[in-house]
Image: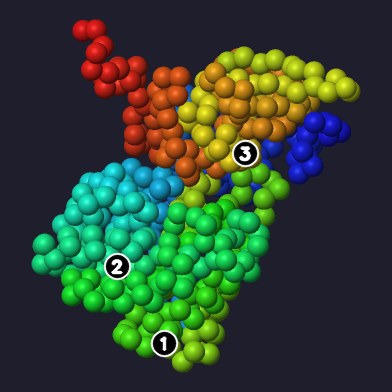
């Protein structure tokens, strides 16, 4: 029977040891002894070698998801006589090995800061397959991007036109650019047909685009590749993408009267499942709907279909990631007039390694990973060790009644934004990142130590 404290979307499982499909990596399964394996490596072995908390990335899941997304958009584009470019959005998770994976997969890479650009270039990818985003790119970041020969810089405000042109002119090179457009479609609000939603920091309002594009075209050291749009994140429905595509194509057609525009970037934001209640659409359905819309609108307006660009990040790396924690303490808390019980499970990490629940009230799925249990399910809340009441990692989950100290707990779909948003709050060291594949573990990013934490304190006693 469901606890009265449980949210409506959470159902008490018939088997508390079962692994929900569609949330965990395909390789996430229990071995003969009941311990979870990821990529053929037992979680106990991972924890023993690398410690906890630990970000675990299933390499094969990453590759499979990337290849499926790439194939979906390439097939849709090919159907309508154009091509597609897939940019991996590095803000989701980035390290030099990820850059090499992206390169091997034949993807492009989107960086949103000078630091991400430095990691991208250190990973060895051809700079021409890298794009730079950001609403406040510094002169230094722009200069480094131009010097590196980046394939594209996305202009986010009018002032950046002169900045990029100046840097390109000083180096006597032609720098390709895109212009980010605020289409007025904000899918995260579920108001897909909003018409005046420009009160945000990103992009240029549609009404101002022709003037800014004219300025771009006036500079001989800038090449205008096309428009760019990003309507939100973690989007399950296609209506927002379709409406944004219609508005962009209309603008693209109007601007094409004054010169060729080879590309159109429709961004990313494709949703993934964090809980059994999440039902993201198949990427093939999304790809077809977007590309079909672009093709139909281009036909109506008598313009050629441009090369279409997309920027998935979370959709590739999110479900490939799992975080392992060690359970420290547990306590049963009586809540409300009915004295319903909520089990608090404290782990050795928290909001410093996963800030999303605190920032966005994001929901996650957890399971006991180091063993099986014969005890009934209990409504639990997985909390961190920080001095914050809002330090919650999994707000609502059913875990075995006998979950105990030193058990290993796994949290699903942590490949995106957990490492990227990690901090040293309360002076906790950030966890390691390990890739697993075919029974082997490969350390990608080592765990921080207390020595690392003190290394930047210039007044520390020697």
Marked residue nearer the N-terminal end (3 or 1): 1
| Label 2 secondary element | strand
To which residue does mark 2 refer? 177
Q: Is residue 356 above or below residue 154?
A: above
Q: Position of residue 381 (x, y in %)?
A: 68, 27
| Label 3 secondary element | loop
Q: Position of residue 169 (x, y in %)?
A: 14, 66
To which residue does mark 3 refer? 361
Marked residue nearer the N-terminal end (3 or 2): 2
| Quarter of the rendering occupied by the N terminus | top right
Q: CA distance from mark 2 to mark 1?
A: 20 Å
To which residue does mark 1 refer? 304
Q: CA distance from mark 3 to mark 2?
A: 36 Å
- Residue extending farthest to the top is 461
Q: Residues within 10 Å of mark 1 (few under 14, many from 20)?
A: some
Residue 400, by quadrant, is: top right
């Amino acid at each position: 029977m469901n606890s009265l404290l449980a949210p409506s979307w959470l159902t008490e499982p018939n088997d508390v040891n079962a692994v929900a499909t569609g949330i965990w990596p395909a390789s996430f399964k229990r071995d003969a002894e009941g311990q979870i394996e990821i990529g053929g490596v037992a979680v106990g072995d991972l924890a023993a070698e690398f410690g906890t908390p630990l970000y675990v990335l299933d390499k094969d899941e990453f590759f499979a998801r990337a290849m499926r997304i790439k194939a979906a958009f390439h097939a849709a584009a090919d159907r309508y006589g154009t091509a597609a470019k897939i940019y991996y959005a590095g803000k989701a998770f980035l390290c030099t090995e990820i850059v090499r994976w992206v390169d091997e997969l034949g993807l492009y890479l989107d960086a949103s800061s000078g630091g991400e650009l430095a990691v991208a270039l250190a990973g060895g990818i051809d700079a021409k397959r890298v794009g730079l985003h950001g609403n406040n790119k510094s002169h230094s970041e722009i200069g480094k991007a131009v010097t590196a020969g980046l394939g594209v810089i996305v202009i986010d405000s009018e002032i950046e036109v002169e900045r990029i042109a100046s840097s390109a002119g000083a180096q006597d090179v032609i720098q390709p650019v895109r212009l980010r457009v605020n289409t007025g479609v904000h899918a995260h609000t579920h108001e897909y047909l909003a018409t005046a939603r420009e009160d945000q920091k990103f992009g240029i309002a549609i009404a101002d685009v022709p003037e800014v594009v004219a300025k771009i075209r006036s500079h001989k050291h800038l090449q205008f590749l096309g428009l760019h749009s990003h309507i939100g994140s973690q989007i399950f429905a296609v209506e927002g993408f379709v409406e944004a595509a219609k508005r962009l194509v209309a603008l693209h057609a109007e601007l094409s009267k004054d010169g060729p525009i080879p590309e159109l970037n429709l961004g990313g934001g494709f949703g993934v499942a964090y809980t059994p209640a999440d039902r993201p659409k198949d990427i093939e359905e999304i790809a077809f709907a977007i590309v079909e819309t672009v093709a139909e609108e281009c036909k109506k307006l008598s313009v050629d279909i441009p090369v279409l660009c997309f920027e998935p990040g979370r959709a590739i790396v999110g479900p490939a990631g799992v975080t392992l924690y060690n359970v420290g303490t547990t306590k049963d808390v009586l809540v409300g007039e009915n004295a319903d019980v909520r089990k608090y499970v404290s782990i050795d990490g928290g909001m410093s390694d996963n800030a999303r629940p605190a920032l966005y009230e994001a929901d996650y799925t957890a399971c006991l990973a180091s063993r099986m249990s014969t005890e009934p399910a209990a409504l639990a809340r997985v909390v961190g060790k920080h001095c914050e009441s809002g330090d919650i990692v999994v707000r609502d989950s059913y875990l075995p009644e006998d979950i105990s100290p030193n058990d290993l707990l796994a949290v699903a779909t942590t490949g995106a934004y957990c490492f990227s948003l990690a901090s040293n709050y309360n002076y906790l060291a950030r966890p390691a990142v390990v890739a697993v594949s075919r029974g082997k573990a490969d350390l990608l990013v080592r765990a921080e130590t207390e020595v690392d934490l003190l290394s930047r304190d210039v007044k520390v006693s020697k």
